Image (cartoon, rainbow, N blue to C red):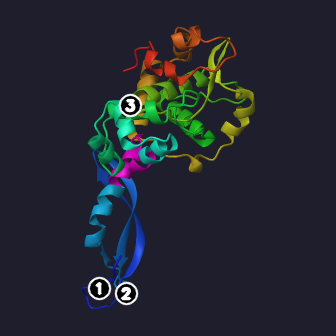
Amino acid sequence: MSEINCPKGHGAMEAKKIERSVPFKGIEVSIIEDAFVCPKCKLLAGSVQSAGKLQQTIAEAYRQQAGKLTGEEIKRLRKVKGMTQADLAELSGFGVASIKRWETGAIQTQSADKTLRLHLKENAVNGNREISIPRILLVLTVFQTALNRVILKENDKMLFAAKYLWYADMLAKRKLGRSMTGATYANLTYGPQLNNYNDLLDEIRNADLSEAEELTPNEVAIIQQIAETFPEDRMVYDAAHKEPAWLETRTGELILYTWADKLIAKIT
């Protein structure tokens, strides 16, 4: 950033990084903006040179918050797989121009994002997200608010809570391209359950919610939809036992997120 002077005559302004929220496409996105601040009158000013970078920063922040691959992620994952932009275009069916636009700031549609993930990052075990114990607790906490009752109980092995969590992760994978928590699930006698849940129960209950990545409006909406569809524990329990994902996965094996597109429960 080049130097600029305060228009009020206070001399040179200081270059700083300012964190702020910006409304974009119906949601508030948090960004860190390069700006100038007058040390005397605290006047804040952007720079002409940073205007283009600011728009790209907002777009990248939006994509991240909306659960889409960012431009940097598309570029990095493409290179990890040893693909050129032309290779990715041919494999995905998109034009090279589209790949270039998405890597430099243009926002892809949800459908395009799912296709890109299929060729770049598809992780059938954790739903394209690293597991976050604090986020598991956050999702369950939001469920409790939506259901108006406690589902994460003391001395409880999450018999019902795990089913709500499983539907949230699976539906998020189907609608948003990645799970909410990154949790892995196993096929047990009593339905889909957190893999190695006995080792995770205390960690989940004692997790620090302040360390959880905030849920997006789309994720909160999914939780609300599930809560409205299954207002009672037995309803979500019975529904999970009818899912092909559970019926066609062997007992003890992981339930892959590839089943997300084959959910049969009518959750609207």
Is residue 60 shown in magenta? yes
Structural distance between the alpha carbons of marks 2 and 1: 9 Å
First in residue order: circle 3 vs circle 1: 1
Secondary-structure class at tag 3: helix
From the image, which quarter does the N terminus lie in?
A: bottom left
What numbered label is drawn on residue 91? 3
First in residue order: circle 2 vs circle 1: 1
119 over 64 or under it: above or below: above
Q: Can see residue 35?
A: yes
> Which residue is denoted by mark 2 in the rendering?
40
Q: Residue at (70%, 32%) from the top-left corner?
A: 201
Tell me which segment is drawn in magenta.
Answer: 58-73
> Which residue is denoted by mark 1 in the rendering?
6
First in residue order: circle 2 vs circle 3: 2
Majority SS type along the magenta span? helix
- Residue 2: % across, % down: 33, 79
What numbered label is drawn on residue 260? none
Label 2–label 1 contact, CB within 8 A: yes
- Residue 225: % across, % down: 41, 25
- Residue 193: % across, % down: 64, 21
